Image (cartoon, coloured by chain):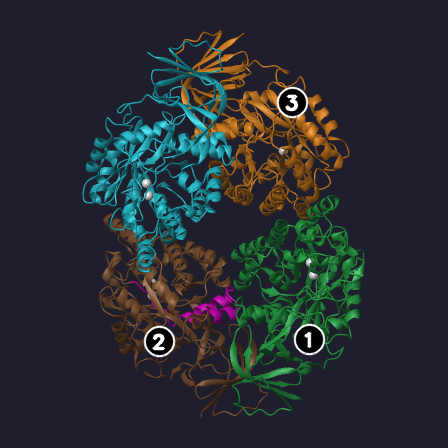
Chain colours: A brown, B cyan, C orange, D green
Amino acid sequence: MTRTLITGGLVVTAADEMPADVLIENGTVVALGLPGRQQWAAERVFDASGKYVIPGGVDAHTHMELPFGGTNASDTFETGTRAAAWGGTTTIVDFAVQAKGASLRAGLDAWHAKADGRCAIDYGLHMIMSDVNESTLREMPGLIGEGVTSFKLFMAYPGVFYSDDGQILRAMQQASETGALIMMHAENGPAIDVLVEQALARGERDPRYHGEVRKALLEAEATHRAIQLARVAGSPLYVVHVSAREALAELAAARDLGLPVFGETCPQYLFLSTDNLAEPDFEGAKYVCSTPLRPKDHQAALWRGLRTDDLQVVSTDHCPFCFKGQKELGRGDFSKIPNGLPGVENRMDLLHQAVVDGHLTRRRWIDIACAAPARMFGLYPRKGTLAPGADADVVIYDPHATHTLSAATHHMNVDYSAYEGRTVTGRVETVLSRGEVVLDRGHYLGRPGHGTFLPRSTCQYL
Amino acid sequence: MTRTLITGGLVVTAADEMPADVLIENGTVVALGLPGRQQWAAERVFDASGKYVIPGGVDAHTHMELPFGGTNASDTFETGTRAAAWGGTTTIVDFAVQAKGASLRAGLDAWHAKADGRCAIDYGLHMIMSDVNESTLREMPGLIGEGVTSFKLFMAYPGVFYSDDGQILRAMQQASETGALIMMHAENGPAIDVLVEQALARGERDPRYHGEVRKALLEAEATHRAIQLARVAGSPLYVVHVSAREALAELAAARDLGLPVFGETCPQYLFLSTDNLAEPDFEGAKYVCSTPLRPKDHQAALWRGLRTDDLQVVSTDHCPFCFKGQKELGRGDFSKIPNGLPGVENRMDLLHQAVVDGHLTRRRWIDIACAAPARMFGLYPRKGTLAPGADADVVIYDPHATHTLSAATHHMNVDYSAYEGRTVTGRVETVLSRGEVVLDRGHYLGRPGHGTFLPRSTCQYL
Amino acid sequence: MTRTLITGGLVVTAADEMPADVLIENGTVVALGLPGRQQWAAERVFDASGKYVIPGGVDAHTHMELPFGGTNASDTFETGTRAAAWGGTTTIVDFAVQAKGASLRAGLDAWHAKADGRCAIDYGLHMIMSDVNESTLREMPGLIGEGVTSFKLFMAYPGVFYSDDGQILRAMQQASETGALIMMHAENGPAIDVLVEQALARGERDPRYHGEVRKALLEAEATHRAIQLARVAGSPLYVVHVSAREALAELAAARDLGLPVFGETCPQYLFLSTDNLAEPDFEGAKYVCSTPLRPKDHQAALWRGLRTDDLQVVSTDHCPFCFKGQKELGRGDFSKIPNGLPGVENRMDLLHQAVVDGHLTRRRWIDIACAAPARMFGLYPRKGTLAPGADADVVIYDPHATHTLSAATHHMNVDYSAYEGRTVTGRVETVLSRGEVVLDRGHYLGRPGHGTFLPRSTCQYL
Amino acid sequence: MTRTLITGGLVVTAADEMPADVLIENGTVVALGLPGRQQWAAERVFDASGKYVIPGGVDAHTHMELPFGGTNASDTFETGTRAAAWGGTTTIVDFAVQAKGASLRAGLDAWHAKADGRCAIDYGLHMIMSDVNESTLREMPGLIGEGVTSFKLFMAYPGVFYSDDGQILRAMQQASETGALIMMHAENGPAIDVLVEQALARGERDPRYHGEVRKALLEAEATHRAIQLARVAGSPLYVVHVSAREALAELAAARDLGLPVFGETCPQYLFLSTDNLAEPDFEGAKYVCSTPLRPKDHQAALWRGLRTDDLQVVSTDHCPFCFKGQKELGRGDFSKIPNGLPGVENRMDLLHQAVVDGHLTRRRWIDIACAAPARMFGLYPRKGTLAPGADADVVIYDPHATHTLSAATHHMNVDYSAYEGRTVTGRVETVLSRGEVVLDRGHYLGRPGHGTFLPRSTCQYL
Ligand SMILES: [Zn+2]
Ligand SMILES: [Zn+2]
Ligand SMILES: [Zn+2]
Ligand SMILES: [Zn+2]
Ligand SMILES: [Zn+2]
Ligand SMILES: [Zn+2]
Ligand SMILES: [Zn+2]
Ligand SMILES: [Zn+2]
């Protein structure tokens, strides 16, 4: 048995802030105590004086190695989870993808194969359903039994991931019976595709048109529709990557009715905007993702939504493509730019910056970045909090250190940073994953294969 | 020149109520004057003392001879327009139907052929687009030039009339450019079809299940979606046969934003309910239409919507099928019951009953039944009001007479009445169409071919 | 008998637009006819070719000779009604004032005495209740019997006109029983008085602070409160001079519920803003009125409210005080500036300008300026429309002429114009009051005493 | 040093549920640890196997010995806090009352004198301001310095506790500057008093009329008004004893805007209704409190509000009056019935029953009953949670035991129970207050004077 003690820090969870020592035995938090009071002996002691001691981050939306638009997301599970650890995230939930015509099982096996033995931190898997039909509906309970309890559908991307409203309703009905959670990419794809085609025909081919055709009203429309379908099915709903104020308003209205409707946003929607999409010399391509970045004035609404709990989770939708060779596929045709941004390494810092800026309290920071995603996807209290019995996924966080985000220094396998040159206050100092030190004062001590697959229970908000 | 004088009545229009004489020369109202003051001479004088003198009704939604579910609506243009006249309606706007794969032109020509020379009263035509594509979009301006200025799309009936959201958006964009009005059947067809299939699989086969599967939330959803698509396209929108309180709420919210969104309901939604659908011995089939009848407590919301002008028009969606031989096609499978109710003869009386019952003012009665539909579909002030220059489509209406609605006495070509045995206060006494007497004190004096096609201007609310 | 004929114009009412001749006998419209068709003979013929023929304006909110803040509104009934006629208004409804401690009767008699024999056009009277108590409540039915059917209360001005919520509720209950209409000045006076005192204490003494202390939220609050009290009492409610977007939103929400709640705005809120209040050299005092002018971005909401019928009436709240000697009473203390603006002469022109600018249709112009105020205050159809039987209050309006508003040329007895230098398109050419020519092509032909008191029925929207 | 160990229970806080041992040294929780892992030695060990270990309840709204309507609430600080302890509540916040014309200081001193040395558990004090004026406003910062950081105002009870809107605004402005929290009794008193007088005049004198005259709309109105005034002042707002669905809707709307607006409800509104007020033989008097009980269908809205966090706190408003001799003062005149119910002993059990019934999760139970009131009123994390450093106010709660609420067995000094005969699942087994055992398996071990005054920081939600 290895005993680790973290002393003198301010323990911050979603609920509490308290000066406390944290005692770890092997991979588990076994006790919290008043600082110095219990004279706990330990092989390894970290002095966290002046620092925060927080649960490791839980990033519930990443796409390592995702095939998209004829290329693959540039982070593997190895490089991506390593970068996550650098950024204070100790759990990711990635997306296995069903190929059209194939089974869920085949997709899940393929993703297990990609991840197995390569991850620096623990990971779970959601399942993307590209093809809702009798056969795949029947597969759902089995996957839930294996700990894959959430299923993502797309109202966008006709011909690729798109499900029609009948398919969505069926999947929601199955979710209602089995306890699964339906995750929704909510944009009206058929309407957007018309606007894309018309924009290209008018010669509007630069990245910024990506933001113009994917209209906020069409995100709001799809969000409303998904909510109504979920009401008919009697199922819960989790809307991914909410970016439009109008879509958030639909969630808020549903939640006011007491409906089990949840929403996620991402740092890019909180910190970036259509101004970035409009950067010249095709630089805007770096910021192409869907839902798209919105005009700056949507940001205040999203911050408010996080405060009012109309949004519960901030994930990254980490899906990096290099500018060279990948984003460039869309020169002259924005619709060919691979959709996605890097971010798994930056999330904890950017959200702490929001604490510094007054957008969030410290506790809310931990809630949206650790506790809520863990609860949402059936990992609590093993992940997402610091309490006796929890996995010892712990971050010592220096709230005063500053550093500058840059592709020159980040650890994600991508040739640019979406936040290049932005200085943030707060920095990860030490990271433990199940009691093992993965990172300490700038030294990476992790290894591929330490991270294990996390079978998840169903959503714990229900 | 023929001069007709109607004396001593209370002229009621959407705006005014005044004791006045109405002077008609040939087919046109030429003057209104204080009773008895001008000593107008006339060949024909009607004494309307104690009666209302109102504009003839405008029924903007009928389906004479519509092919549906392997049979045809049982009223021809001849029988249907005659019945309309009996009920005080002097204008109908019916729907020409594009056959899938064929042109709008072919559909329009076919409907002209059905109607030409057979109508007792004037008529216009909307166009049902079954297939929105580049070719049919290009046909729209030509039809508008011929006075067919409104185009109906369906969000229900996949595989039959259904348009997907991309098609709807394109049609709305074309409407935005040309001034056309998009009429929408707003129900989420793909989701409903799933529920239909599941209900039948559970053995739920009686007519009442028609009402259960076509859920109010799915009407509301489609209504919301149509509104958002219209906002994206910058076009107006007219939602037909609104029956659900929740759908009405979507319209009201849009109108509060100042959007050019309009709504129609029908007498069946105001006077009938799911109680009728649940009548035993397959009698419920008489009340099968889509959108379906709703539980009784939706009625109060619809009446309020008519008072607050969140609904502007009451049409009939007249689409009769005989119980024997037609409705019976759906014995044992509610999804095979032809959708539609008779009603063109009953609308003016039922809405006057609503005046008697305190739901509407007299002026609002004329507004929703005459003036608003005329304005909505580009027929004002020729139709829908009584003023110098208007067509002399005039009804002398006895507000005190009572009569009982019944298949035994009605003039529609259908073997049942949806309002069998209901006694109403108020009765049509005399009907003029362009100055010619079509009906007088129970004597029908009209003839097929008197009614002529009305080329319509674009919507006059815009 | 005198016969007057107005030929060749476009008759515009709230409901209709039609080329028509208007035949007048003595003081009454007796017939409308197709142009030229009836060969009507007349002593006096006006050729209105190329002009509009419209009902005379009804200004339902004026304050001639009102005592306020130690001075009196500068227009008498003689000068004020003459100016009204110049501007195309043929009916005003002014406010009799109950003095604190005195009876309604005494106030009404005093106002009759001021108006009798002096008015150029017809006039009605509302009653301001300064003191709701058992005695004044008992007087209400008597006044209604004399045609004073509307009673104004103030939620502002503690110590002067202010009624507390108990008094308001009692008056509304009495209104509910008698059919009276409660008109409400909706601003939270006790809260505003705190802000006034604090602003003055901080040395904020210029006119613009008048706009800052009378906060939009406090207008909205009072509007909401008045609506709730009216719901408890079961009475209708008419909110005067709505200026804040937030207050309008309260009215709109109430109307969506089907409540009998009505709202009025004024040209100053549609055309002026806090920019005017901030004019230097104490010029801002010219624009001091309550509710105050709002920031410019409230204007769009008000225009929209007029289009969506969430506001029904545009009156002037005409209450002029000369800049010299009157407005100047508040130099160095904005709270001492007499509250009020001149405007009775400008309303019809400014609202026609709104037609030119695309804010309103022609028919809506006539509705909000003529028909709706007449209906609201029990004068319809004698006033507010052109139809057989209506009073021959008729304006021939040239829609193409332009002129410039200015104190140099206006006829109100006040030394400034709130719209100085503003050029408008549209001009009154001829004005008839009960068939008598009051104004013709720039010649004033009226006389004091032509105008008679109008006993009014109760609100015709109920 | 005394060491106490609670082993084997399920620790439930607002955030977490975990099997854990709780180690207490003297009056403080010093560590939580995995069950059995640390071999902690202790003088006193409680075996909590199969039980919950929860923070002691915080009842933020009680009125011990309150003078009201010529009598006094029947529980003294001694009897009332003892009863609280019996019910698992270890902290109360009671209300000191300013007498009209006297200073806050005098009122606070008087209440300190009543409580000092008599309480079984710790207690804080809010301050009721009966008279907002320059002098009392100036006293506020001093009281905050002494730990009285919340001030209650009344929009009801004109002539007694009532503040007008100007006074409310001033107090809120002062709160905004000093960090104080304004607590509001939100009912429109002046309007209600009119209705009371009229009801009595009509001979409506039974207790049930108390519920009829204090209309839900007038609670909603006052709630809306308080919110708007708080917005003007820039201050937070806490609305006490929310009972009407419509009032809750106002809070929810404000919170959707991100405003710092909070709401409390009470068990009586969740479990009782106007049916109780209507109990015959004057029994309804037992349920007379203000805001009043509402019709049963309001309950679902309140439960929903607790789940959606539109309501944050459940307090009791404990204010008992004996049926004999006290409630009876209002026989024949409901307005003379002293307002208030007993409940301080029943809150934790009733809310656990709500967990059993599925209205709340276990964690939400602890949140609304312990953590949220502690945070709201500046007592966190000393009170309201179990964490190293917290006061050892701990309850061992048996979730399976059942018992029956009854005046025969309760410990409150009042001759009836509002929940007489109701059987609940769940029972307090052991209660510690700052480490001392107050109650253990039906034996009361506490003493007057153990409880000490809690100076509170300002609201911790801001
Ligand atoms: Zn997505
Ligand atoms: Zn994604
Ligand atoms: Zn249809
Ligand atoms: Zn139809
Ligand atoms: Zn006023
Ligand atoms: Zn006024
Ligand atoms: Zn209270
Ligand atoms: Zn209380």
Question: Which residue position holds label 1?
Answer: D85
Is any part of residue D388 visible from this angle?
yes
The N terminus of chain B is located in which quarter?
top left
Q: Residues within 10 Å of mark 2 (few under 14, many from 20)?
A: some
Instruction: Report whether residue C21 is seen.
Output: no
User: In this figure, which residue is indicated by the disc labeled 3?
Assistant: C77
Q: Are marks 1 and 3 in contact (CB under 8 Å)?
A: no
Q: Which residue is drawn at the image coordinates 43% and 27% (left, top)?
A: B427
Against D256, residue C190 (above or below) is above
Q: Secondary structure at mark 2?
A: helix
**Protein chain holding label 2:** A
**Could you say whether the residue bearing mark 1 is in a helix, strand or loop?**
helix
* Left or right: C460 in relation to C19: right
- Residue holding disc 2: A145
Quarter of the rendering occupied by the C terminus of chain B: top left
The reply to whether discs 2 and 3 touch (Cβ–Cβ < 8 Å) is no
